[in-house]
């Protein structure tokens, strides 16, 4: 069973595990475990997707319980009225915070877009990022004598394919576990020495306006065992606060600890 983060008569949100497909795909016809079917069977009701997370990414996945509500939510996504918050572990040390405005050329799928001939142009891609913590571990990986990692928080303003992964690669700090864009030797070392055997990218929170009630809503997803183990090893337990899985935005402000 999947962890249900929020459910009412119009919406349902789950904590998608890393490695799960959101829906069935002809690219992986043998996959029997997908989020949509599992949620449908779990709540006994048909669900409609309004956005997606890549297979290796975990975290908040929101679905509608009717096609009408799905349309309203899709409009919020298309108009960039939802705020997404991600956490990731990067290779190396990345300092400070900034807004990265770096256009990306559309990535084509090797199979689905095999015969595509249309010239691709760079599309606007904007990501806010903030470094939360850094660590250096006395483990030699690849050509380096020690392993350095950075914990970051990211919020994309656009929704390009693999945007967060590609933006971090542009900064020369790929996300650990990124087999498509990252450093394979670093990925193997992080898995072997620190148990990070997955893409270390987690959709921690989704902020939106409820499409029916009009109330501001923040849905949060907790971290899996791989993340928890990494945080403990690196002494980062306090860097990602243990917050309720779902709360209204005005309550979140009231409950925010004093600096």
Image (tube, rainbow, N blue to C red):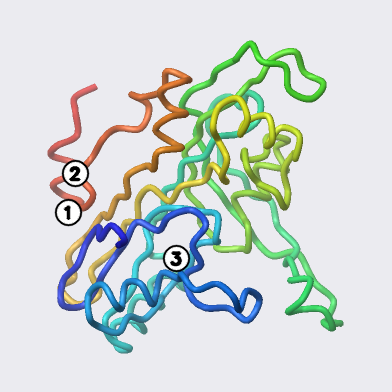
Going from N to C along the chain, the mark reached first, 3 or 1, is: 3
For the residue carrying disc 2, how many other residues have a C-alpha within 10 Å: few (<14), some (14-19), or many (20+)? some
Placement of the N terminus among the 4 image quadrants: bottom left
Q: Mark 1 = which residue?
A: 248
Q: Nearer the viewer, mark 3 or mark 1?
A: 1
Q: Is residue 92 above or below residue 203?
A: above
Q: Position of residue 113 (x, y in %)?
A: 77, 78
Quadrant assignment for the C terminus: top left
Residue 58: which disc?
Answer: none
Say which mark, if any, is on residue 80: 3
Element under disc 2: helix
**Front residue (pair 252, 142):** 142
At numbered mark 1, what does the secondary structure look like: helix, strand or loop?
strand
Residue displayed at 26% across by 72% down: 42
Q: Residues within 10 Å of mark 3 (few under 14, many from 20)?
A: some
Q: Where does residue 106 sit, x and y in percent of width and height? A: 72, 67
**Mark number, residue 252:** 2
Task: Residue at 53% x, 20% y: name it.
Answer: 134
Q: How far from the left and from the top, in percent, is residue 55?
A: 54, 61
Q: Answer yes or no: do the residues labelled 1 and 2 have beta carbons within 8 Å?
A: yes
Kind of element beneath mark 3: loop
Q: Nearer the viewer, residue 188 or 217?
A: 188
């Amino acid at each position: 069973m999947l962890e249900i983060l929020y459910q009412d008569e119009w919406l349902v949100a789950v904590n998608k595990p890393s490695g799960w497909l959101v829906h069935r795909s002809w690219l992986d016809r043998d996959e029997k475990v997908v989020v949509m079917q599992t949620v449908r069977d779990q709540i006994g009701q048909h669900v409609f997707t309004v956005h997606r997370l890549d297979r290796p990414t975990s975290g908040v996945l929101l679905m509608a319980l009717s096609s009408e509500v799905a349309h309203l939510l899709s409009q919020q996504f298309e108009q960039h009225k939802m705020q997404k918050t991600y956490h990731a572990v990067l290779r190396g040390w990345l300092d400070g915070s900034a807004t990265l405005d770096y256009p990306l050329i559309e990535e084509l799928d090797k199979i689905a877009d095999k015969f595509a001939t249309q010239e691709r142009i760079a599309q606007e891609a904007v990501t806010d990022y903030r470094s939360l913590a850094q660590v250096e571990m006395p483990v030699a990986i690849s050509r380096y004598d020690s392993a350095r990692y950075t914990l970051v928080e990211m919020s994309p303003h656009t929704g390009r394919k693999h945007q967060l992964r590609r933006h971090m690669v542009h900064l020369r700090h790929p996300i650990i576990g990124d087999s498509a864009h990252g450093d394979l030797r670093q990925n193997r070392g992080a898995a072997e020495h620190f148990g990070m055997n997955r893409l270390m990218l987690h959709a921690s929170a989704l902020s939106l306006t409820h499409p029916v009630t009009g109330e501001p809503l923040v849905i949060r997803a907790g971290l899996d065992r791989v993340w928890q183990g990494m945080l403990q090893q690196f002494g980062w337990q306090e860097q990602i606060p243990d917050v309720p899985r779902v709360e209204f935005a005005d309550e979140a402000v009231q409950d925010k600890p004093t600096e």
